[in-house]
Image (cartoon, grey):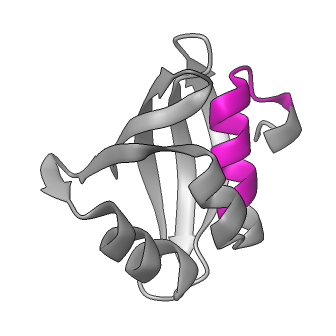
Amino acid sequence: MTIPVDRLSDPAVRAFVTALNANDQEAFQAALTPDATMSDDGSERNLAEWTDKEVFSSRGHMEIESEKDDGRTLVARYRNDTWGEMRTGWRFDVKDGKIARFETGQA
């Protein structure tokens, strides 16, 4: 069973996932703080390069399986044209209603 994106508890996380799933780079950037950072499988990544490769140029998409920590920790089935589908964990730090940092990796 999946959680509809519009039912995600945290508005900043909801905006992030909505923009990612719509492949909307402008809305995605608007969901982030200007100095947002991220890591993938425990390694710091360049956010712009990572999102271009793993999300936008490969049509990334998240189906949310569960949320906790008031919606700031997700387990999702993530798929893109490069890697196919995998079960992933996502943790978000929110500042002033935007995503300041996210960490993702295989769940």
| In the foreground, 100 or 59 | 100
Q: Residue at x 75, y 29 (%)?
A: 8
Q: Residue at x 50, y 36 (%)?
A: 99
On the rendered image, what quadrant is the N terminus found in? top right
Quarter occupied by residue 23: bottom right
Q: Is residue 14 above or below residue 30?
A: above
Residue 16 forms part of the magenta stretch:
yes
Q: Residue at x 72, y 43 (%)?
A: 15
Where residue 11 appears, as percent x and y from the top left, is 73, 27
Q: Which residues are magenta?
A: 7-20
Q: Is residue 30 above or below residue 21?
A: above
Does residue 107 show up?
no
Q: Residue at x 49, y 22 (%)?
A: 95
Where residue 60 appears, as percent x and y from the top left, is 58, 72
Quarter occupied by residue 62: bottom right
Q: Is residue 49 above or below residue 26?
A: below
| In the foreground, 14 or 73 | 14
Residue 24 forms part of the magenta stretch:
no
